[in-house]
Structures are given as structure tokens and as C-alpha cells.
Image: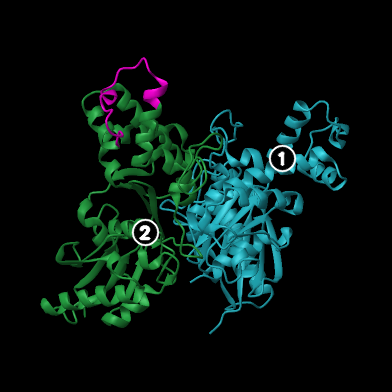
Chain colours: A cyan, B green
């Protein structure tokens, strides 16, 4: 018997949003709670599980839910735990067995993983990776995350923490300092923050060069500013995306040597820069790719709705057997 | 009913060696043919399949062989083909459907993959990776190859050619030229050839430094010479291994961010350099590893017999369902 729905839970530091999702990736019913209002994992699960049970009862969905999938910061897929998550008040210093608690409260099977892995599962279930068995999702947000699928399965590693491609070292000497305490990580060059950093560096190092970005003085430059300037034909802004795309394209060539994915899917705000980012990525890939992989891996932008993708991605975990 | 044996085939450019292997990884019977004596893939399979059929008949093994696994240069695991292999006379310019032909000739299921992937399967079935689901084998020979296992499965990618970690770019600017036509590949620094190259570079750049390696003038320096000199207490030789190990350790940190393996297993001649290579690898890993992975991944040297490993690795493919 086909059970028609799953529940996706997007847990953030402030809010936890959840929804009932069908096979096509439509979110039928939604709810949310405040993540930070609880002081222990047990209390949080009382709140979240209770809200989910209510949503099920209210909409007559008893017996129609296959399971719950959760996207959780620092989520460990192997153990179903959230481990020392800096932004989650009740999980800062402890390991919370979240899936076990959720199953106890709701009676439903529950799985969790981190946000970028959930994004990859969402692409496979409902998005650009439908039907693909080998692909990589790169999330370009405040940081850079990744979800890697090979043989149709998420790569989670022996400890549940595989897929930190934002923290591969791409510059060995004089690399930019990273929030992780190291230097030269991909994230420091290609996150939204990295783009803003490149903007400031180029503005400083090319004082002779005119740019719309020089008009922004009363607040920090953002990646959105750079995009708007590029759209308006600003040369320096285009150069910033060229620098960013080159770093991504070069890194992608190394990723391809690892898992030879059919596609690399870009997700997150920066991915919407479109050709400003994609053209230099393509160029760097053509110049750097190992012959055996040449022209085989597509780089595409996710077509999932940014606002829904987190719930959808999490929900996709619950379709898996 | 448990079928007790498999056959492993190690196909090289000159010879093809094969053997009947049991569950423990003992090679019970052996044979070999000349790879280069045949002018087409069909003729080669007539020869190889015929020799295997004879070995089975001679030793009364009918019905006791589960299948055939082959380690093949440029072998495509997804398709069971050998594709444009430069060193195989009858497969230089064509794609040969090797497993299909072998099954037709012998009546046995047949799988193939490239040498480094076969090495990984061998480690999982009989060697240091027994019981592991996530590990990487790095082969340090004339070139550098890799076999990556995640979730207990080989990562072969959408095209069957994943796992070319010898060709990740580790030096972006002024990198050494590689046989692949690119620059700065890991292989150019950490293969046996790369070690010899480092030796020549250091001898040239440090003319003031005495070294046993300076006594070798009538022939090219080999990695074995460097090892012997290091054992004899030669400082420059130790420095060469430090340089090599640092390059490996730094690269391993990026590999770990990809698949978070339980172990990285070193295989091939250079792996026998022992602590001369392992100590600098460990040091570079401690200095470069992302916090979440710190101290979790072991670097170990394969304990499979070099002379048997290729047949064993290939044979391991045939135990898989």
C-alpha cells in the first residue's frame, strides 16, 4: 500500500518550520514552532512532535504519513542526533537523540541530516536531480555547504559528517581566514560573504577603477549589491563574479575527480547570479578538467523554490527505505 | 548454497594473471596468458576464457566458482567495457565489451573495474578495510590512483570513471607538468616518479647540502634510492619524504571533507617507506584537518602482499551481489 505523504521539518536556530509533502513535492499543510523557546531537547520534541500530531489530526491524515525527515544544523545522519550545534540553545553542549525522541512522540519513523544533505535529497526527489544517481549539490549562502550523492545514496561517511566541500583548502599560501579557524577554504572565496570580501579587496587594490560599488559607503557591500552592479554593466562587479566563478570551477574539477557526478547543482542566493557566475565556472572547468571527464558534468542552478526547498529537502529523507 | 571460490584476473599491458581465490583471500590455483599476443578483444577472450575453463576443469572446480572479477586498465565498471586503453594493443582505439564476452565464453558472471578500484575491493574483502564501509585506497606507484568506498560501495560515478585522486590539482601556480597534460596534479608530487623528481629538484636547489644521493650519477635516481638513503640517515632523503608526505597529508584533508572515511589505506611500493612517509603525512593532517574530522581518520599501510594484491582485488568484485 502506498502511503501518500511525508513530513519535512526545517529546523533553524530561531524557527522550526514543517509541512506535509506529497510525491510531487507540493507542500499541502504547514506549521511552525520557535526552536529557541525550549530549554532541553526533550521539551523541544514535546513541542514539535505535539504540533505535528495536531496537524495530522486536524487534517485527518492518520495512517497517511510515511515518516518524518528533518534538516538539522550539525545533524548526524548515522546516529539521528544533533551534536553540539552552536545556534541551537538546547543543543549547544550536548548530543540530543532527536530522531529517537521524535519517533517516541509521534509514532512515525524519523530521519535527519544536515541542511546541505537535505538539499541534495530534495533535488533527487523533486528537483533538478530527479532520476540521477550521482550528483553534488553546492549551497552558496552565508557559507558554502554540500550534499554528495553517489550510487543513489547520500555520502555521509563513517561519522555522519561527510560533505564539507566549503572547507576544502583551495589556496595553500596566504589564503583568506575562515570561520573554521583555518585558511584558504573554498567558502572564504565563494560564499555570499566571500563575494563581498572579494568586492572590498578589488575596490581597494584597483583605486583607479570606477565602479557603482564605490557609491555604497554607509553600510557593508553585499553579494546582492555586486549582482545589481553587474546587471547594470559594472565592470568591476563582473570581475568579482569572474574571480568567484573561477574558484568554483577549479574546485569542481577536483570534486569531479572524486565522484564523477552527472551534475553539480548550485543552490542558494548566489546561484541566482546566473550567467555572471555560470560563465566563469564553465570557463574554469573547460581549462582545468581532466580529459576523461571533459564535457560530461553539467553545472545547473536548482529550480526548487528557495522558500520551500528546506522543508522539501528534509521531507525527501522520509521517502527512502 | 555457498559457492566457495571466485576467480580474480589481473590484466596488464604485457601479461594477464589469474587465480582461483577462496573467502579468506588465499590463491589456490593460478594461470596466465600474454595480453599482447592477441589482435582483437574477441581473440583475447577466447584465450583468457579458454585458459580459465581449462583451469576449472583440471582442478575439478565446475559449479564451485561464483564468478570472475577483473582489474583492467581504463576499465569501465558501469558498462563492463575496456575503453581506449593506451597500453592494451587490442583496445587502443575501440571499446571492448569485456565482461559480456567473458560470460559468453565461461558461463560465469563477470565484473571488471580499474586497478585502483580493484585494490579497494581487495582491502574490503581480505585486507585492512575488512568490515569498513567508508575508506579510500591510495595507490602510490609510477602514478597515483585511488579507489573510494562509501556506504560499503565503490564510488564509480555516472560514467564509471570516478576516483582519479592522483589528478586533483594540488598546486595551482607553477605546478609540475603531468602526463595527463595538466599541471600541479597530486601524482606529479607523490608518485614514485614524483619522489624521484623531488630528489632531483632538491639536489639542484641545495648544492651546499651533502647527500648519498649525489653518488648516483650514471642512472636516474629512483624512489627506492631515496628510501635507502633515508634509512642510512641521509638528511636530504628524509627531507624528500617530508615534502612528499606533506603533499599527501594536505590532500588527504580535502579528501576527508568529501567522504569522511574511517581510513585511508596506502598501497604500492612507496607505501613501504613506512614512518619516513607516514610521520609527515600525520603532521600535515594534524595541521590542516577541519575540526569536526580531527583525529578520526586513520592512515594505514596495506597488509596485502604486493605480488598477490592485484588478483585478490579483482577477485573481490565477484563476491558482491
* Residue A207 badge: none
Residue B212 covered by magenta stretch: yes
**B309 lies above or below B28:** above
Q: Residue at x 40, y 28 (%)?
A: B201
Q: Nearer the viewer, residue B200 or A97?
A: B200
Q: Position of residue A167 (x, y in %)?
A: 55, 42
SS for dot 1: helix
The verdict on residue A58 being magenta is no
| Residue at horizontal 62 percent and vertical 62 percent from the top | A313
Q: Identify the image quadrant of residue B309.
A: bottom left
Residue B24 in the figure: left or right of residue A85: left
User: Measured from the top left, where is residue B312 in percent x and y?
Assistant: 24, 61
Q: Which mark is residue B87?
A: 2
Q: What residue span does the magenta drawing correspond to?
A: B202-222
Of the 4 image quadrants, the one containing the C terminus of chain B is bottom left
Determine whether the residue tagged by mark 2 lies in a helix, strand or loop: loop
- Do callouts 2 and 1 point to residues on the same chain? no
Residue at image position (40%, 23%) is B204
Is B5 situated left or right of A176 in this image?
Answer: left
Real-space CA distance between mark 2 and mark 1, rounded to the nearest whole angstrom: 46 Å
Label ID, residue A195 = 1
| Viewer-nearest of discs 2 and 1 | 2
* Parent chain of label 2: B
Specify few, some or many for label 1: CA neighbours under 10 Å numbering under 14, 14-19, or 20 or more: many
Is any part of residue B182 visible from this angle? yes
Amino acid at each position: 500500500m502506498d502511503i501518500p505523504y511525508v513530513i519535512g521539518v526545517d529546523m533553524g536556530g530561531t524557527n522550526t518550520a514543517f509541512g506535509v509533502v506529497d510525491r510531487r513535492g507540493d507542500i499541502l499543510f504547514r506549521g511552525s514552532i520557535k526552536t529557541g523557546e525550549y530549554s532541553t531537547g526533550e521539551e523541544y520534541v514535546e513541542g514539535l512532535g505535539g504540533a505535528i500530531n495536531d496537524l495530522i489530526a486536524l487534517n485527518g491524515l492518520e495512517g497517511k504519513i510515511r515518516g518524518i525527515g528533518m534538516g538539522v544544523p550539525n545533524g548526524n545522519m548515522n546516529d539521528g542526533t544533533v551534536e553540539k550545534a552552536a545556534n541551537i540553545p538546547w543543543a549547544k553542549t550536548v548530543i540530543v537523540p532527536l530522531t529517537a525522541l521524535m519517533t517516541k512522540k509521534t509514532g512515525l519513523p524519523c530521519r535527519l541530516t544536515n541542511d546541505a544533505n537535505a538539499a541534495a535529497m530534495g533535488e533527487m526527489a523533486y528537483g533538478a536531480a530527479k532520476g540521477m544517481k550521482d550528483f553534488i549539490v553546492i549551497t552558496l549562502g552565508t557559507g558554502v555547504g554540500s550534499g554528495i550523492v553517489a550510487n543513489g545514496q547520500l555520502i555521509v561517511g563513517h561519522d555522519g559528517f561527510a560533505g564539507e566541500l566549503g572547507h576544502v583548502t583551495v589556496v595553500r599560501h596566504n589564503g583568506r581566514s575562515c570561520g573554521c579557524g583555518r585558511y584558504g577554504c573554498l567558502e572564504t572565496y565563494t560564499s555570499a560573504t566571500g563575494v563581498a570580501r572579494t568586492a572590498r579587496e578589488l575596490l581597494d587594490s584597483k583605486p583607479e577603477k570606477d565602479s557603482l560599488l564605490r557609491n555604497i559607503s554607509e553600510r557593508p557591500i553585499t553579494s546582492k549589491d555586486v549582482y545589481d552592479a553587474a546587471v547594470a554593466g559594472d565592470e568591476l562587479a563582473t570581475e568579482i563574479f569572474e574571480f568567484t566563478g573561477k574558484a568554483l570551477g577549479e574546485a569542481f574539477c577536483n570534486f569531479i575527480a572524486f565522484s564523477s557526478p552527472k551534475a553539480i547543482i548550485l543552490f542558494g542566493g548566489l546561484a541566482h547570479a546566473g550567467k555572471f557566475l555560470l560563465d566563469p565556472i564553465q570557463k574554469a572547468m573547460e581549462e582545468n578538467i581532466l580529459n576523461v571527464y571533459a564535457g560530461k558534468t553539467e553545472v545547473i542552478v536548482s529550480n526548487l523554490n528557495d522558500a520551500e526547498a528546506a522543508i522539501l529537502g528534509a521531507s525527501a529523507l522520509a521517502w527512502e527505505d
